[in-house]
Amino acid sequence: MEYLERIDATLKLFGGRFIVHGDEVDVLEGSWQGALIVIAFPDLGRARAWYASPAYQEILPLRTGNLVGDAVLVQGVSPEHWTGNQRSRAATLALERIEQLSTIGMRWA
């Protein structure tokens, strides 16, 4: 519990934020055990700096001593990649999805 109380302060310094936090997954293919946690950072450099930071290293044993799991860093896609993908699929998207995306500011041209 102490880990959960302290991790947010370590993330904030590096622009990190939780995207997915620990709910059980719905496995469609393959096998997966446990929960999934995804933390986003502005870039890999800040993710690495967060992990190596004294503040995070201080609380890391609170996690590793209480659960078994993997920790990995992965380069995400840029917002432009996602936007381009949605634009290229516009003809196949449901009208409801196009309206949802338009509502949050998606520009189609």
Image (spheres, grey):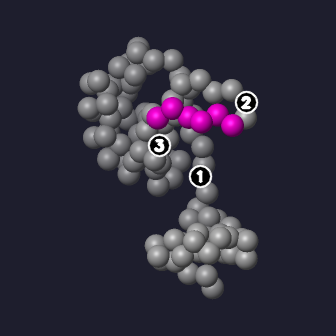
Residue sitting at 53 percent across and 48 percent down? 44
Circle 3: element type: strand
Dot 1 and dot 2 residues touching (CB under 8 Å): no
Write down the quadrant of residue 65 in the picture.
top left
Point out the image quarter for the C terminus.
Answer: bottom right
Circle 2: element type: loop
- How many other residues sit within 10 Å of disc 1, few (<14), some (14-19) or many (≥20)? few
Q: Nearer the viewer, mark 1 or mark 2?
A: 2
What's the distance in space between the residues labelled 1 and 2, CA to CA?
22 Å
Does the segment drawn in magenta span residue 24?
yes
Point out the image quarter for the N terminus.
Answer: top left
Q: Nearer the viewer, mark 2 or mark 3?
A: 2
Hey, what amino acid is under mark 1?
Answer: Gly
Q: Earlier in the sequence, mark 3 or mark 1?
A: 3
Q: Is residue 49 visible?
A: no
What's the distance in space between the residues labelled 3 and 1, CA to CA?
14 Å
Q: Which residues are magenta?
A: 23-28
Residue carrying label 2: 30
Magenta stretch, main secondary structure, is: loop
Circle 1: element type: loop
- Residue 62 in picture, x, y percent from top left: 35, 20
- How many other residues sit within 10 Å of disc 3, few (<14), some (14-19) or many (≥20)? few
Residue carrying label 1: 76
What's the distance in space between the residues labelled 2 and 3, CA to CA?
20 Å
Residue sitting at 51 percent across and 18 percent down? 68
Q: Nearer the viewer, mark 3 or mark 1?
A: 3
Q: Earlier in the sequence, mark 2 or mark 3?
A: 3
Hey, what amino acid is under mark 2?
Answer: Gly
Q: Is residue 75 visible?
A: yes
Task: Say if 84 sits above or below 53 in the image.
Answer: below
Q: In this view of the protein, which residue sits in the foreground, 43 or 31? A: 31
Residue carrying label 3: 20
